[in-house]
Amino acid sequence: MNNPYEFAKANQDRFLDEYQELLRIRTISTQPQHAGDVAEAAEWLKAMMLRIGMQRAEAVLMPEGRCPLVLGEWHGAGEDAPTVLIYCHYDVQPAEIADGWETAPFEPTIKDGRLYCRGAVDSKLHVMANLKAVESWLASEVKPRVNIKVVLEGEEESGSENINAFIAAHPERLAADIAMVSDGAILAPDQPSLTYGLRGIAALELQVNAPVSDLHSGHWGGSVHNPIQALTEILAQLHDENGTVTVPGFYDDVVDVTATDRALLQKVEPYLKAEWEDVVNAPALWGEREYSLPERLGARPTLEINGIHGGYTGAGMKTVLPAQASAKITCRLAPNQDPARVLRCVMDHISRLAPDSVAIDLRPSEPGAAAVLLDVDGLAMRAAAEAYEYAWGVEPVFERSGGSVPICVECAKVAGEVVIMSYGLKSGRAHGPNENIYLRNFYNGIQATIRFIDVLGEKRA
Amino acid sequence: MNNPYEFAKANQDRFLDEYQELLRIRTISTQPQHAGDVAEAAEWLKAMMLRIGMQRAEAVLMPEGRCPLVLGEWHGAGEDAPTVLIYCHYDVQPAEIADGWETAPFEPTIKDGRLYCRGAVDSKLHVMANLKAVESWLASEVKPRVNIKVVLEGEEESGSENINAFIAAHPERLAADIAMVSDGAILAPDQPSLTYGLRGIAALELQVNAPVSDLHSGHWGGSVHNPIQALTEILAQLHDENGTVTVPGFYDDVVDVTATDRALLQKVEPYLKAEWEDVVNAPALWGEREYSLPERLGARPTLEINGIHGGYTGAGMKTVLPAQASAKITCRLAPNQDPARVLRCVMDHISRLAPDSVAIDLRPSEPGAAAVLLDVDGLAMRAAAEAYEYAWGVEPVFERSGGSVPICVECAKVAGEVVIMSYGLKSGRAHGPNENIYLRNFYNGIQATIRFIDVLGEKRA
């Protein structure tokens, strides 16, 4: 073929087959029993990099030895050409049919132009759209005018601890002029968007212990502070009626929304409201009244309870007064909040709230990540905007995402500029049941990455 | 043998073997998948009744057809003799090794004079102590001077709905002069006690729903009232700092502790405090400061959260904003509280507390049972006191139990007098992991029931 755009179009069916092949591998990095699946996927990805013509590819075992980093490199543009680093992750969140899936979570199912599977959006879509864009370039007569590095992470969903250590130890391996972090979602299937801000994250677990063993609630109820009750009493004090977090110091370092932010984000509001009605559809909108929906979701910090458990939760009743109850909590962070400091504030506050009648155990469970704010007028951001316009035929809008992509912070350490290019959709239900993607966005994504590489080369020439 | 006391002593080893045989059958009535085990146990018990010489025995299928009632009868004392009805239940609570069991929950294990198994205390101990007492009488030369009816229930742990209907439909089948309800616990291994009061029970489940599906907590957190958070906010408002229930109307009909109660229960306090230190051992005693420990446990109503669940509770983190969260709640009731009215008060209050940002679903999950207060000076109570003193060599003290034995209310409908005879122990961890019983209390229980039957015959003569 003459050019990569045509090659990609001619090979859509095969690309889709390969995407589905990767989706079937259960790369759940949060569950140690899936270490073998993660390793299998890493070998599969490394083999693909070599097959599509990358000059170097390897699966690097991380220190804990269970979630390899897959690195690939093509340096055919020459020493003087700039280098683009493409980052994606191939691990996924857990998924069980019992969570509400209508199809088997790890069997890709195509229905009405959508593909349903755990990882379809988050983030094997990005892994495959980018690898297939690189393949399309390397299979064409015209070659990229930038060198290309690809890094695929295997533990983004479980804390990214090892990739950070790897980058710190081997900065030259990922060094680039521009890092393209490919993860996340655009605004609507036919309205691309560029994310210029991301929330950070800090996570912890709280366990409340009272009696030394599970007890009969009839025999002992009324004489011991039920740990479920104590847990609810603590958790209920973490927000006020406005949805504002009540932890002292929580908002101290937050950089507030500016007039520019407000203007950019206003364009996003109608889309987000429509998506909220579609995807969330709770009895009422909720949260800090003084902020708009895109501001609440993209620019404001939150404290969420992601899981709670205590006592008997099976079918029927069991009159137990349990020995413990626990909750998993994550905070999404605004720019300038330090994850460690936020965790300390939350843990201190919970310790103060805990009554003497119970014992608590607090465990910060991830290193956390700071929020990110990118320059909307940078070279990479402008190239990305052009790439989206080419692939979608629509100018992208600018937004701030509520999710956390900690790797952006790390990439900024080895790259001159960072840009986030997302081909997923919020309605794609990342992390939830029935995760899915419009197939046309997979194909658009391939075209966009091809174009992004093209424009970076043009701008250099 | 000449008399039942000697027969029982001579056959202790065989009695223990048979007790263990029954313990191995997983009669979990709250879990429909164990219906076959419950049916197997019913047939086993019916066969035993016939083998020990009862004149009539049958396993009656309840309307729902899964937890048979086993009825046995011996009427050899003649038409003019009084009849004693012995009630026990052979079903048990669920048990999983993961709950903290040190031995397989359904494999009886003897260690240091104790027998560990689900059901060891609650309540196969009572089933077997009473059947073996009847066997000892019927195998002896001297015969009982009272007629004996035995009724063994198979769904005490799951609401007792069918036995109530059965008694209402066939009162003559269980009609008796004295009903002995055999369930529950004595004060200490070597200090028998007679329970003259029992708390009632009322149960419900609460589910909080917000988004239509599980969501990514980064993408949507801050715009929707997290149902786990909303649930904790509701539950945290159900008690004040004193442990007093805040539900309006909750205490309206409660008959308060009298001076007589206070005097009787004072004797129990040191035992209960020691047992609390041993079994509960929470960081602090908790509950209504204006009531003593035996009063809090036996005479005051409570509201307990028995289970809570929402979001992701497996290993590691999952940044999910769940569609729902739920809790199981039981109230223990004081004399004169109507279970239906209490449930209505609690449900009305929860409905008022629930914010518009979530939807709630409230399900009363059991018909409930009223509390019971028995006459400490009645004929049956005095015969029971004599039986305990004979078997243990120690006068029993009088107490009120925190547990609920709804069947007492039903038995009062068909019997002139009701007495509760318990051979279990609170430290036996009924409903919890490592449920156990001192073997000597099994043997003492057999002697006590033999003596109870003897004394009732004497008092008649």
Image: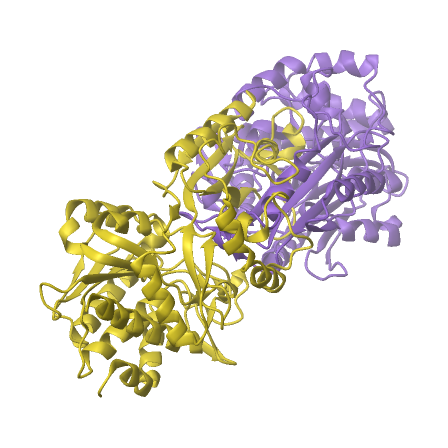
Chain colours: A purple, B yellow
Q: Is residue A243 visible?
A: yes
Q: Position of residue B388 (x, y in %)?
A: 39, 70
Q: Is residue A85 visible?
A: no
Q: Residue at coordinates 33% horizontally, 68% vertically from top-left?
A: B25
In the image, farthest residue toward the left: B79
Q: Is residue B185 above or below residue B236?
A: below
Q: Quadrant of residue A303?
A: top right
Left or right side of A278 for A294 = right
**Number of numbered discs visible in the structure rendering:** 0
Quadrant assignment for the N terminus of chain B? bottom left
Q: Position of residue B52 (x, y in %)?
A: 19, 76
Left or right side of A124 for B128 = left
Q: Relative to the observer, which residue lies in front, B320 or B61?
A: B61
Quadrant assignment for the C terminus of chain B? bottom left
Q: Relative to the observer, which residue lies in front, A204 or A17?
A: A204
Q: Residue at coordinates 45% horizontally, 77% vertically from top-left?
A: B109
Q: Quadrant of residue B424?
A: bottom left
Q: Position of residue B459 (x, y in %)?
A: 24, 67
Q: Relative to the observer, which residue lies in front, A390 or B295?
A: B295
Q: Relative to the observer, which residue lies in front, A45 or B75?
A: B75
Left or right side of B321 for A347 = right
Q: Is residue A293 above or below residue B154?
A: above
Q: Position of residue B43 (x, y in %)?
A: 21, 66
